[in-house]
Amino acid sequence: MSFFENTRKPEGFGGEIMVAMMNFGHRALARWGMRFLTLPADGKVLDCGCGGGANIKKLLEKCPQGVVKGIDYSPVSVAKARELNEQAVNDGRCVIWQGSVEQIIFAKDWFDAVTAFETVYFWPNLHRCFREVYRVLKPGGTFLICNECSGDTDKDDKWTRKIEDMRLGRKDATDEEVLAAAHLANCDEFAEKLPDKWNTNIGENGCALSGGERQRISIARAFLKDAPIILLDEATASLDVENETLIQTALSRLIQNKTVLIIAHQMRTVAGADKIVVLSDGVVAEQGSPKELYEKNGIYTHMADLQTKGQAWTI
């Protein structure tokens, strides 16, 4: 399973990272959505597709004498949700179950409210899932579906067009997968500062962005592609120190467990390589690990020393 398929059903180490990102990334939307949810202090709530359990924690705060239960079909999500709400689980105020919304194990007419935050688009057999939600809700109960956009407005359409540029990495990527890729590539660092944030018109070929910002969008596409082999050609060339550092951080995430070929003049870009091949006048002059090459005191050593000294220069 690719890293970004983990948005549907988080699994393994990549799933653990994804669940943590969802807990953080959905906070603002969940906080907004919960404003429309009125619950008694002893209310009973079911959170479907509960992910890492951050929303369960907030729902428990809204019902200080109540009970909140959660469903998610990812064992990674269930484990994280139970860990985050351990005290409430131990107190008997919280139950988190691994399973599908198609077959909810809980009793009929039991919940005051059922919630679904950024999840219904992953549900198979949607009509069956909704039928189950209706079954477990009390008569007159509330079913809160909270997604970032409905796709029915001009603004939603504008948002979709914006993320299409990143979606070039994988045309079938969901909006959530695109946002996760943007986060890993440090795109959110500059996107949140734009005049209209993620809805800002960045011009043809991203002409309104700096070179480093455009580079980070390219890295986000690579995250979406999730290819086993990556070719990086001067990935940090002509960048200021701040952008180079951010891109180096993003690249370190991108290249994990992959075969990577790097073309570079910046020695720090290849400092973690298993093997370096030094070209001079079109032929192979040296090759070996960074440590081996540095000890040869040849071309690689000369370039590395010059660049290290250059980093200390001030005007």
Image: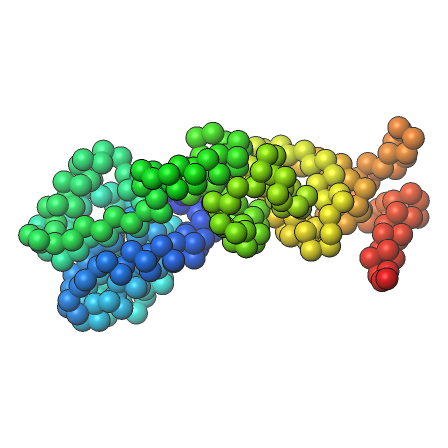
Residue 246 falls left or right of residue 66: right
Q: Nearer the viewer, residue 43 or 302?
A: 43
Residue in the picture at 24% in, 43% down? 100
Residue 122, image x, y percentages: 32, 39
* Picture quadrant of residue 281: top right
Name the one closer to the observer, 109 or 145.
Answer: 145
Q: Looking at the picture, how far across and down is residue 27, in whole percent?
A: 38, 58
287 w.r.t. 62: above or below = above
* Residue visible at 52% across and 52% down in the picture: 195
Judge whether residue 209 can be spotted in this image: yes
| Image position of 39 (left or right of 314) | left
Q: Quadrant of the N terminus?
A: top left
Position in image of residue 159 (x %, y %): 43, 41
> In the picture, which quadrant includes the C terminus?
bottom right
Q: How is the image coloured?
A: rainbow
Residue beneath the point at 43% across and 38% down: 158
Q: How many callouts does the rendering have?
A: 0
Residue 270 can be seen in this image: no
Viewer-side residue, 102 vs 249: 249
Residue occupying image coordinates x 38% and y 50%:
76
Spot occupied by residue 103 in the image (x, y as percentages of width and height): 18, 42
**Considering only vertical position in the picture, is 176 above or below 242?**
above
Left/right placement of residue 214 relative to residue 3 reads right
